[in-house]
Each structure stands twice: as structure tokens, then as C-alpha cells.
Image: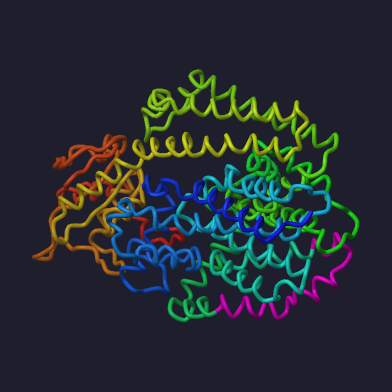
Amino acid sequence: MSVSCRERRQTLILVLGLGVLITLWRLGATGVVDETPPLFAAAGRAMAETGDWLTPQVNGLPRYDKPPLVYWLMGLGYSLPGGDFWDPLGSWAARLPSAFASIAMMLVLTDTFLRWPQEKDIRPRSTSVITALAFALSPLVLVWSRTAVSDALLCGSLGISLLLQWRRFADPTCIAWWPAWTVLGLAVLVKGPVSVVISGLALLLFGALRHDLRTAWTRLRPVQGILVTTLISLPWYGLELLVEGQAFWDSFFGYHNIQRFTSVVNDHLQPWWFFGPVMVVAALPLTPFLILGLVQVPRQRVPPEQSLQQFAACWLVAVFLLFTVAATKLPSYWLPATPAAALLTGFATTGRNRLQIWAWIISLGLVVLLAICFWLAPAWVGWINDPEMPTLAVDLLASGLVRRTALWFSLAAILGLIALVLREPAVVGLLGIQVPLLLFHITALIPIAELADRLRQAPVRQIAAQMRQQYRKGEPLAMVGVIKPSLHFHTGQIILFEGRSDRALVNLADRLANERRRGWVGYSLEGNEAPDTVLIAIDSDTSKQEYWRDLDPIHLGKYGIYNLWRLDRQRLEKRADVLKADGVEADWRQPRQERF
């Protein structure tokens, strides 16, 4: 069934509105969430403030973990005038690249379905909307579309590149060969060569499934395409290597790419089957339709314009295989597969057969189960025990948000059941489930995130404000115990971070005298103008440790679990000397790849 230009335009406008509602609604109502997002946000803001758009920097140190595109986009946001008015928490500018990438992915998914309606699809407009929502309402996408990191931007750029590659394969007269490779070059500037690996593996699997590598090779022109990708992405890598030298090579390529793939870093050890459950959770509650979409993938060669389901399956399997082989595993690594999972979910709603009815019944069962779990929340919410948010369980129940969540899931179950009983097409039943889930996201999930922000992040912002107010010229700032990089982001000052151990105290004393960072140096106690105090943010548990007791700090305030001290540095030095005499040695000079 063909779709007119007017119908396609109307559907795209609808999906655009849904995408804006899902990703942009109250996007800046909460601050950046520790621990990784503040590092991205600080690097983007530093580019705007310093004018150095080559090397990302955080807290006076270069940040080599990701290429610059996400930082460039964040920096552009921070460069806009009036940020204090429209972005008082600094989170809008940091999250916009993630939000826009997910919206763009929704639009390209929709447009692809509308331009190439598949053979059994009698309602391509409805199927395209279901597919876009299956992507946007994935639990993973909901979280990372509103998070100031690079994962959603990678998902969007790589996903758009892959869909452009399929569109070129399906109809070489409709689109040139180079746009897909251009976008792939941007994806390489988001997270490195992994984008090329996923793209190449997906195309190889696609050619193998169709027993036809020649057509894809001829239409996609991979040799010229890789050249385009290289011309777009390589200049930054070359300049960064020229300026930063071996440190950049060792950190970005050695640690963040090769070592992450071949060995476990940051204790992210997971079993080989880790991404199986992640795939299941990421598609909830429509996981049965995703599985059905995989089961129904044609094994025989079909016309190129009818091969999108095959392509989506190969895309998903490519991500699964690559990151299953990788030693380091994180749930966010599955994000590049979520557009493919959405496509397969959409395909499973076309036609009508017994397997589809079973998928519908199981999906309804999952929705009912989730509704029951939320109705029974008073029995289990009390198990939530976060020392940084000790009142979360009580506040969550008092807010009524869990009950509201139960209502929306109950409505989704009722609407889905009505559609099933009335023998409506699956697309109608799935829309009946998705609309309440959309309302759940807007009226319950986002307010829950705002509640958590008030309990967990607001105290950090408050102590940052007090630090700025109490700051004396040249006085160093530190945070010990619970480490929150957002303190650096909100103060705009260099913060020395140390952990809970007695070695942390020794490190801090030594760093205050000797450390050097870009735009900041440690302060010697012997200098005439050297400040004799240090401002320290310290959590309550750490402050009770024996080695932090009896230092006679000046208490400047308490914010949540954090205390703000002004501490005499001579007392700190004396305590450090005592600990050194007991055999505690400073280790801050030892190289650490992930340091801020």
C-alpha cells in the first residue's frame, strides 16, 4: 500500500511532535546526574569558555575517552546567549545532543517505513508510528535520550547511517551513495572506530543472509565510502595526536578502545550471555513482538525494496555479536541495536497469524504483571536503600507517582485486551498499549526523576553554591569520601577529588602542595600569599572516620549527606605526617586512565 506525500508529511509531523514530547519535555528540570554526565557537560562547557575546541578538558585535565562531536554540540549549546535564564542548571545544553539524536532517529525510521511499505503491511502509517514509538519508549532509549553522554548520539548517527545504506541498496535511484558514509564519519567522531565495525559487520551478515554480497558492494561503494568516512573523521584524530602525543594514543586507542574490548575495565565484568537479558528488557513490554519479528525474518532472497526486515535482523545481530565478544559489557552498549529492534517489532505487527496473537497475549501479560507490581509497591518500595537518598522510599509513596504509574499500566492492559477481544489488527492493539506508556513517561517517570534529583543532586548544587560564596582568592577546593564530579561542574572551579580511605587524606595533603593542572597549580604552604586553609566537601560517613576526627574544621553548612568544612592546612599536613609514619603512602602520582 503506497503512501502519498501528504500522508507521509502528516505522519512525520505527528512523530516529530511525539519525539519532542518524549525527549524535550522538562529536559532541563533536573541537573546533570553523577557520575559520568557532569564530565561530558563540563568538557563541552570548557570548550565554549576557553575557545579550545580541539581537546576536551575536565577539571584542568584532558579528557581523551571520547571523540569531540558530542562535546562540540554541547559547547554550541553553552555558547548560546542567556543560558542563565533558559538553562539555569546547565543540563539543557548538555542533554540536547542526545534528545535531538533520538528525535532524528524516530523521523528516519518513520520515513523509511513510509517510503518503502513492506508487502504485508496494509497500514504503513500506523506501522511507522508504532516503530518510532517502539524505539523511543524503549527503557534504554528513554533514559539515554535524556542523559548528557554520547551513547544516544552514537545510536542516532550510526542508526541513520545504516538506514541510509539500506535505502541506497533498496533503490539506488532514490539516494546517492555518499550520504550514508558521511553520517558514518560523524558517528566515528562520536565514539570512535566501533561505528565502522558495527556497520561493516551488519553489511557482511546482510550479504551472507541474502547470498548476495555483490549487489550491496556495487550499490553502496564501500571503498569510496570508507574514504569519505575517513576524510570526515580522521583530521581531528590527526590533530589531536599531533598536539597531545603519546598520552592521547595510549588513552583513547590503547585504553578506551583496545583494552575495553579485550579486558574488563572498571569492574564491568558480565557473563557472555549478558546482552540476551538486556535485549529482552530494552524492548519491554513488546519483547514478544521483537522475538516474533526475528523469527519471521525471510531466509530466502527477496527483492531489495522488501529486504528491510532482513537488514534489521542483521543489524541487531551485529551489535549483539560484537559486544558479546567484548570483555567489557555495559547496558548502554545495546543502544545502537534499539532502532533495529524497533523495526523488527513493527514488522511483527503486519499481517495476522497465530504466532502474532500469542505475542500479543504475552505482551499483555507483561503489562498486567508490571501493573500488579506497581499496585503492590507499598510492599516493596521500602526495600530501596540508597544512603544518598535515605528518604526516597517514603517520599516516593507519599508523592502518589507509583500509584499513577500503576494506573497507566492498568489502562494499557485494558486497551490492549479490548483490541484483542475485538480482533483488531495488532497495530491498533499496540498503539493502545503505547499511548498509556507515553503518558506514564510524561506524568510519572519524569516526575520520579525530578524527585530523585531533589534528594540526590540538589544537595551537591547547594554545597557548590556555598563553596562559591565562601571561596577566598587562591583557596583550594576538595571533595573527599563520596565523589561527585558535578561539584566541579557547578562550581566552575578545579576540585581535588579523593575517596574514603586514610590514603585519601595523605593524597590530598600532598596534592595541595605539589599537583599541577591546566590553569591551576597546587599551593605551597611556604608562600607568603599561599592560603592557609582548604574548603572541603565531605560526606557524613567519611567525616566520622578516625583519621578525619579532631581536626577542628570550621563548619560552613550541611546539605543532605554533605558537610562543608574550612580546614587549616597545617592541621591537615600534621595528620598526614602521622599517617605516613604509620606506613600510609600517597599514590596520586601513579598513572590512572580515568582520572578527573
Percent across and percent down for residue 555 are 16, 40
Task: Using the rendered image of the protein, determine whether residue 507 is visible from the camera's viewpoint.
Answer: no
Instruction: Work out which residue is located at the far left of the displayed protein and give it.
Output: 528
Q: Residue at x 69, y 77 (%)?
A: 225
- Give the camera-side residue of 86 and 529: 86
The N terminus, quarter of image: bottom right
**Looking at the image, can residue 208 be seen?**
yes
* Residue 142 within the segment the image draws in magenta: no
Q: Position of residue 275 (x, y in %)?
A: 67, 46
How far across and down, in percent of the image, does residue 106 sit?
A: 60, 54
Compare residues 208 and 168 and report the one nearer the observer. Answer: 168
Residue appearing at x 45%, y 28% in the figure: 401
Q: For this rendering, which residue is in front, 363 or 280?
A: 363
Q: Is residue 333 above or below residue 203?
A: above
User: Position of 581 compared to 104: left or right?
Assistant: left
- The residue shown at (59%, 27%) is 411
Residue 456 drawn at (x, y percent): 36, 39
User: Which quarter of the rendered picture does the C terminus lie within?
Assistant: bottom left
Depth check: give the residue in front, 580 or 434. 434
Q: How many marks?
A: 0
Q: Which residues are magenta?
A: 205-234
User: In this picture, is 247 found above or below 471?
Assistant: below
